[in-house]
Amino acid sequence: APLEEVDLPLFFGWFLLSSVQEKVRCTSMDFLKTLDTLEAFKKHLADFTGKAEKEVDLEQYFKPKGALHCTTKFCNYGKAEGAKEYAENPAVKALYGSAFELSLTALFVTPRTVGARVSLTDEQLQLWPADAEQSSSLPPGSRAHITLGCAEGVEPVQTGLDLLDILALQQDGQQGEPAEEMELGSLTYYGEGRWLLSLREPIGAPACFSSFYG
Ligand code: 2AM
């Protein structure tokens, strides 16, 4: 392929420093380990297994998806819509290679994915593409997340869609079903296997804004 077709990355994003990757992975493993022992979770087990009586080991159910990061723009080497415009955005150029601190404010689990919600600052929102939330009426940055794992056969792009789905329910005034006060925070059930843990203490995660070519 001509060089100009490959000079855009697979995606831009914030890449967590390795020390904090380990911390976030441990926190999410601890959460999954506890979640599948809760009576509230067992009551809705059929969401995951299709059968009420079966057990599920969530730590095995979700497969890790490589280095932890928060995608800003999926460029697909320039083939994705708006990729070139994003790469040429002055904020993207100016902040490329800079250090940031991401704030992880919730963990969420669905039968497809497990992820962490990232709450972006105004500065971080400069790097957020306008089209990320798609046709939803959710505010910019709503989709920001870190994929922590995916069920067998599920692609990581699903994690952000699962988060948007939960946030759209909240926006529609659906409070969800308060399920449990955990050490990490409050756990809410939104039906159809959708669980959200609002962290009592957000996790601060140092990260570098960069890109991935694969
Ligand atoms: P993720 O951000 O939810 O983890 C490489 O596939 C990376 O780009 C993954 O991190 C993936 O999901 C993200 N990604 C893949 N396809 C995408 C899309 N169409 N829109 C946004 N992000 C996408």
Image: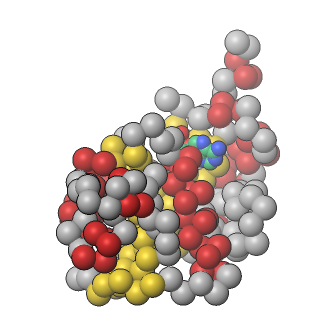
Indicate the quadrant where residue 19 lies. Answer: bottom left
Residue 69 percent across, percent down from the top left: 45, 51
Q: Position of residue 208 (x, y in %)?
A: 46, 53
The image shows residue 132 at horizontal and vertical percentages of 69, 57
Residue at (30, 48) in percent of width and height? 61
In the rendered view, would you say 17 is above or below 185?
above
Against 155, residue 174 (above or below) is: below
* Left or right: where 151 falls relative to 3: left
User: From where the camera sits, is residue 37 visible?
Assistant: yes
Judging depth in this view, the residue of 104 and 126 nearest the camera is 104
Residue at 33% x, 43% y is: 63
Residue 123 visible in this rendered orientation of the protein: no
User: Which of the pair 185/118 is nearer the observer?
Assistant: 185
Horizontal side, residue 46 vs residue 13: left or right: left
In the displayed structure, 194 sits above or below 210; it is below
Task: Tell me where residue 162 sits by quadrant.
Answer: bottom right
